[in-house]
Image: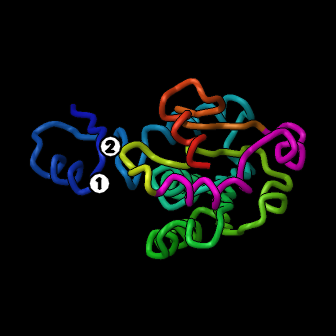
């Protein structure tokens, strides 16, 4: 088989159409399903089940991780909350598709902008980097300013369920050692 890891969703779909072997999406701009499989396995190992799990995605929910977590939670009957500033939520068409899935599985999908309210009772708080690979530096300052209130820190985790876990798909820039982290710090 072929694992495709790149930018365009249309490329992996075209590859799958013409390949004579199975093709799976390892990561595109729109989706990251292999990450979700690994994450859901981790959640199940930690909590014993995916049943009654409330997962909050904190930050920019418009791209692959927000999209994929929403799809995965909808399919698995979980409670998914996207917590983001206005304009940073998943595409309305994908939300509608996931709501249709949720109607069949019993999942709950919420979209709110208040971090403290979003994490109340949450079992899993998930975030990602604020600027994705390949994005121009011209978007960094605006993105960092918009997402700074959505930083997952000890104070926010304290508002979640006492047994809540934090997840991140990595890489995470929590200091200024990597060159790209230094550029992000300058942009903020």
Q: Are marks 2 and 1 in contact (CB under 8 Å)?
A: yes
Residue 56 vertical placement versus 40 (above, below): below
Packing grade of label 2 (10 A; few <14, some 14-19, many >=20) is many
Magenta region's main secondary structure?
A: helix
Point out the residue furthest to the front here.
186
| Quarter the N terminus occupies | top left
Q: What's the residue at 59%, 62% (across, down)?
A: 105
Residue 77 rendering spot, x and y as whole percentages: 62, 57
Residue 89 rendering spot, x and y as whole percentages: 56, 67
Q: Is residue 156 left or right of residue 49?
A: right
Nearer to me, 180 or 152: 180
Q: Is residue 163 left or right of residue 180?
A: right
Q: Which residue is mark 2?
A: 25
**Residue span colored magenta:** 139-164
Q: What's the residue at 83%, 47% (across, down)?
A: 156
Packing grade of label 1 (10 A; few <14, some 14-19, many >=20) is some
User: Mark 2 or mark 1, which is nearer to you?
Assistant: 1
The picture quadrant where one finds residue 155 is top right
Residue 110 vertical placement versus 46 (above, below): below
Marks 2 and 1 sit apart, C-alpha to C-alpha, by 8 Å
Residue 121 rendering spot, x and y as whole percentages: 85, 52
Label drawn at residue 9: 1
The picture quadrant where one finds residue 30 is bottom left
Residue 100 rendering spot, x and y as whole percentages: 52, 73
Nearer to me, 123 or 180: 180
């Amino acid at each position: 088989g072929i694992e495709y890891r790149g930018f365009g969703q249309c490329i992996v779909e075209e590859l799958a159409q013409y390949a004579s072997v199975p093709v799976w999406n390892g990561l595109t701009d729109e989706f990251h399903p292999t990450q979700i499989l690994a994450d859901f396995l981790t959640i199940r190992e930690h909590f014993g089940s995916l049943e009654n799990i409330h997962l909050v995605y904190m930050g920019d929910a418009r791209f692959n991780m927000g999209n994929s977590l929403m799809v995965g939670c909808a399919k698995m009957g979980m409670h998914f909350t996207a917590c983001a500033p206005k304009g940073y939520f998943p595409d309305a068409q994908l939300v509608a598709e996931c709501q249709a899935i949720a109607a069949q599985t019993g999942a709950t999908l919420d979209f709110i902008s208040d971090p403290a309210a979003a994490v109340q009772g949450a079992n899993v708080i998930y975030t990602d980097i604020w600027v994705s690979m390949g994005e121009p530096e011209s978007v960094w300052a605006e993105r960092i300013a918009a997402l700074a209130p959505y930083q997952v820190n000890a104070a926010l985790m304290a508002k979640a369920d006492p047994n809540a876990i934090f997840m991140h798909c990595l890489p995470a820039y929590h200091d200024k050692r990597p060159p790209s982290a230094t550029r992000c710090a300058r942009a903020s």
